[in-house]
Image (cartoon, rainbow, N blue to C red):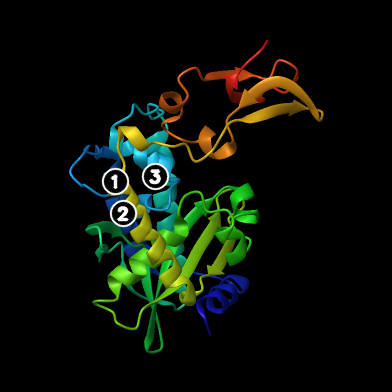
Amino acid sequence: MDIATKLEAFLAGEPKIPDDIIFRASQMFNNKLGKFNFTRKKGGANLPSMSQLGKPFCQLHAEKLGWDKVAESDSFKIKMLYGDMTEVIAVALLLAAGIEIVDLNKRVVLETEAGYVRGELDLIIREGNSHSLWDIKSASRFAFEKKFQSYEALKNNDDFGYLEQLYGYTKAEREETPDIKAGGWIAINKESGEIKIVKADPDDEEVYTSKINNTLTKYLEADESNFERCFEDEPETFYRKLTGNRKLCMTCSYCNFKYSCWPDLVYAKNPRSKSATAYHYYTVFKD
């Protein structure tokens, strides 16, 4: 049985997690909780990390130029802990379902034409004599239902570069595990607890590792003179009528460099809406 079938069968019965796995999971979470006290250091690497490579290039460019970022919220570290906790839960369930995990949170280095790219993979699973590499993702209900609906859906909506990460990690690990292939993503709905297995297509590895090389070549050439936005602002409509305002697209609204990229940006509530949550980032705003 593959991991999806094993996990489904385990959860469909009367699932119980053995004490030794509970202890192992508690030790994992102790280590994850220690990250709360960790402060990230700026600088050091001359290339983006594996987890950054699939982001829109304008974000990588802005990072290289040292643009001012939006300050992290007071709850940012707690949000990260939720992701870590999800990973621990997923690992405990996989082990309890009889799935063999041979490596966790392993640091890897990918050798590229532009230099070395570093990252940390989530887990490697052994099925018989073959190995596969998997990423664990905690997801909102919207992302779980849309982004992780299928492999094709993820390919068409991959603003965070999950595909570059997975295939990059897989290629980096192949020096030590020659038969390894990209497995896919284990997504957990943070709201409902549902789990979904999204399988990758190992035949796509060359496509995405080529994208990594192209991105890094472009990154090395990036400077103040050649910055370009990857997205433009968009007209606002209300009940299908133009309001005269313009706002950031969804991807840009989550970017840490949005105020540096759009110096006149205004965060305001749509004056025509009665909804208390109708706030947007406006590039042009008329009361």
* Cα distance between the residues tagged 2 and 1: 7 Å
Residue sitting nearer the eye, 53 or 3: 53
Q: Could you tell me residue 285's position as x and y percent?
A: 62, 16
Task: Give the quarter of the image for residue 108.
Answer: bottom left
**Left-right relation of 48 to 17:** left
In the rendered image, the vertical position of residue 55 relative to residue 63, given as above or below: below
Q: Secondary structure at mark 1?
A: helix
The residue lying toward the viewer, choosing from 228 and 211, is 228
The residue labelled by disc 1 is: 221
Q: Which mark is residue 100?
A: none
Q: Which residue is mark 3?
A: 81
- Mark 3 or 2 closer to N-term? 3
Disc 2 designates what residue? 217
Q: Residue flagged by tag 2: what amino acid is it?
A: Thr
Q: Closer to the camera: disc 3 or disc 2?
A: 2
Residue 90 in the image: x percent, y percent?
Answer: 46, 62
User: Which of 7 and 111 lies nearest the eye of the viewer?
Assistant: 111
| C-alpha gap between disc 3 and disc 2 | 34 Å
